[in-house]
Amino acid sequence: MATLLFVLLVAFLVVGVPVTFALGLAAIATIWQGDLMPMLIAPQEMIRAVNSFPLLAIPFFILAGYLMQGGGISRRLVDLSNALVGGMTGGLAMVAIVTSLFFAAISGSGTATTAAVGSILIPAMIAKGYGTSFAAANQAAAGALGVIIPPSIPLILYAVAANVSVGDMFLAGILPGILVSIALIIYAYIYARRHPMVAEEPSTWPQIWVAFKRGILALLMPILVLGGIYGGIFTPTEAAVVAVVYALIVGGVIFRELRLAELPGVLRDSAVTSAVILSIIAAAGLYGRVILTLQIPLALSDFVIGAIDNWWVFIILVNLLLLVAGMFLEAAAAILIFTPILLPIAVNFGFHPIHFGVIMVVNLAMGMFTPPVGLNLFIASQISGSTVAQLSRHVLPFVIVVFLNVLLISFVSILSMGLIGG
């Protein structure tokens, strides 16, 4: 039955069945073939999977991201980043990364970050002489910061799946997110040195001050959200609601760029995105229930512990597994599928659940800009006009850079646990 469960999932994904239906159909077929439980359990389990208070943060953070995009907040973040680093070698590529870092600290979504920042900066980079494919690949990789920097939707999903604190997961993602950002900036600098292009004029201090004043309200948003969580003022779910209200007031009342007539479209787009993620969670909940019923985690744990002596061999194999899985599965689905399987084994090897969660999330972030199903890659492709095949060659160095960071995060636990005292 375990073989049937995984073979059906892979088969459905290969033929192009959407992830939600692939998970659900594979689980239902296995239940029916093996007579594992009453079929009535299937809808009940799917409802139970999404019936979680922390998961309410997901649609609200997604809505906040769309409101930021429509309300001019993302453009002001671009202007501030450009004033800070735009005049350096590879400045615009760095601007895309720094802006994505700021935007990610508010939206929690990699796709929203790629769309909002990329729609502004990809055309700007191309106009300044950056290769079209490099500009798109750079933004696709930078957009992945949206799932690493808190508040992050995959961090929330892992916290729910592993039954750990969402606040602790957010805190654990800060240093790894900054580390990956710095690594991407270094690569952008090296690329620009080897491929000369039109440089931006360095900003003067008065220009930086003007950009800072224009962007201060945008910068206050992550401080408000994360400060409120860590200060014990509100929960992560309540923080997501605060982010929506703040984005609505700033974009609609203060900046006056978010018009009332645009709100139905913003609500529709955020509802569609939320529905896609929550439907994956529901189907993955049923799939996970079948996994537990078949006692796959226990059997796999016994096998791995008996076959592998060293924890570092285990974590290298896990990272390779997640790298491949991320190429074919969305981060949400991969987290919900692999957490119940891999976490018990990781704990037996001495990994803290929060540290292991950061490893998973950072690794799966690469899946957002790797073919064949990297969502950021498709968004960047549409904005730039390049094909996904053209972007694939340019995105490879970014994959290598991030994977090296994953290994560093895996072996140096203080990067994840330092801020929570672990």
Image (cartoon, helix red, strand yellow):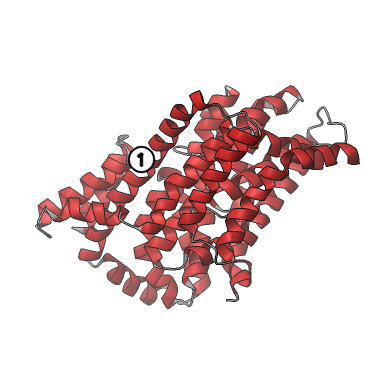
The residue lying at 30 percent from left, 52 percent from top is 284
Amino acid type, mark 1: Ala
Relative to 210, 227 lies left or right: left
Residue denoted by label 1: 275
Q: Position of residue 9 (x, y in %)?
A: 28, 47
- Residue 286 visible, this angle: no
Q: Position of residue 142 (x, y in %)?
A: 62, 43
Relative to 113, 297 lies left or right: left
Q: Position of residue 371 (x, y in %)?
A: 48, 38
Viewer-closest of 251 and 291: 251
Viewer-closest of 98 and 166: 166
The picture quadrant where one finds residue 76 is top right
Which secondary structure, mark 1? helix
The residue lying at 28 percent from left, 58 percent from top is 288
The residue lying at 20 percent from left, 52 percent from top is 4
- The quarter of the rendered structure image containing the N terminus is bottom left
The picture quadrant where one finds residue 197 is top right
- The quarter of the rendered structure image containing the C terminus is bottom right
Say if 221 sits above or below 164 in the image. Answer: above
- Residue 6 visible, this angle: yes
